[in-house]
Image: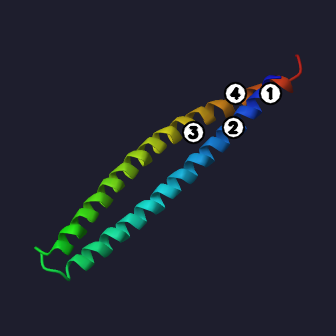
Amino acid sequence: MGLLVSQIRVMYLQQARLDLEYKITLITQSKMGLSQSVSDLMAVGNDYSPESPTTKLLQQRVAKLKVLEQKLDAQLAQYNVRLKMIETEYESAVAMRDKNIQSSFSYGR
């Protein structure tokens, strides 16, 4: 029974790890898109005079995008911490499963 439970736990942790890695990938892609958007807005802003309303509007949008990027950074940090926790627990679960395999298939001496 312990072997079955250990294997289920390992599989659950593998799935949780893959889920977090996917979320980290999505956040990284979103950050790259945001960086491109900020660069595009900055390039467009260079075409206008610094005091024009359009430039001020673009600067506001850049500021909003930077705030969004900071939120993504915080989410990314949180996911990385969770991923480290899951990896540590995964290693423990694998060790427990291996111990259960050894005890299940060893014969009394």
Q: CA distance from mark 2 to mark 1?
A: 14 Å
Mark 2 lies on residue: 12
Residue 18 appears at what percent x and percent y?
62, 48
Mark 3 lies on residue: 87
Say which quadrant the C terminus sits in.
Answer: top right
Give neighbour class at mark 3: few <14, some 14-19, many 20+ (Cα, 10 Å): some
Give the image's coloring scheme. Answer: rainbow
**Does residue 103 sit above or below 70 in this rendering?**
above
Residue type (three-letter) at the residue carrying disc 2:
Tyr
Mark 4 lies on residue: 96
- CB within 8 Å, label 4 to label 3: no
Q: CA distance from mark 4 to mark 2?
A: 14 Å
Under tag 4, what secondary structure? helix
Say which quadrant the N terminus sits in.
Answer: top right
Residue 41 lies in quadrant: bottom left
Question: What residue is rendered at 62% in x and 41% in y?
Answer: 16
Q: Looking at the image, is mark 1 or mark 3 earlier in the sequence? A: 1
Q: CA distance from mark 4 to mark 3?
A: 14 Å
Give neighbour class at mark 2: few <14, some 14-19, many 20+ (Cα, 10 Å): few
Direction top: furthest residue = 109
Q: Looking at the image, is mark 2 or mark 3 earlier in the sequence? A: 2
Q: Looking at the image, is mark 4 or mark 1 earlier in the sequence? A: 1
**Does residue 22 sit above or below 7 in this rendering?**
below
Mark 1 lies on residue: 3
Front label number (2 vs 3)? 2
Residue 84 appears at what percent x and percent y?
51, 39
- Quick check: 25 left or right of 7? left
Q: Looking at the image, is mark 4 or mark 3 earlier in the sequence? A: 3
Front label number (4 vs 3)? 3
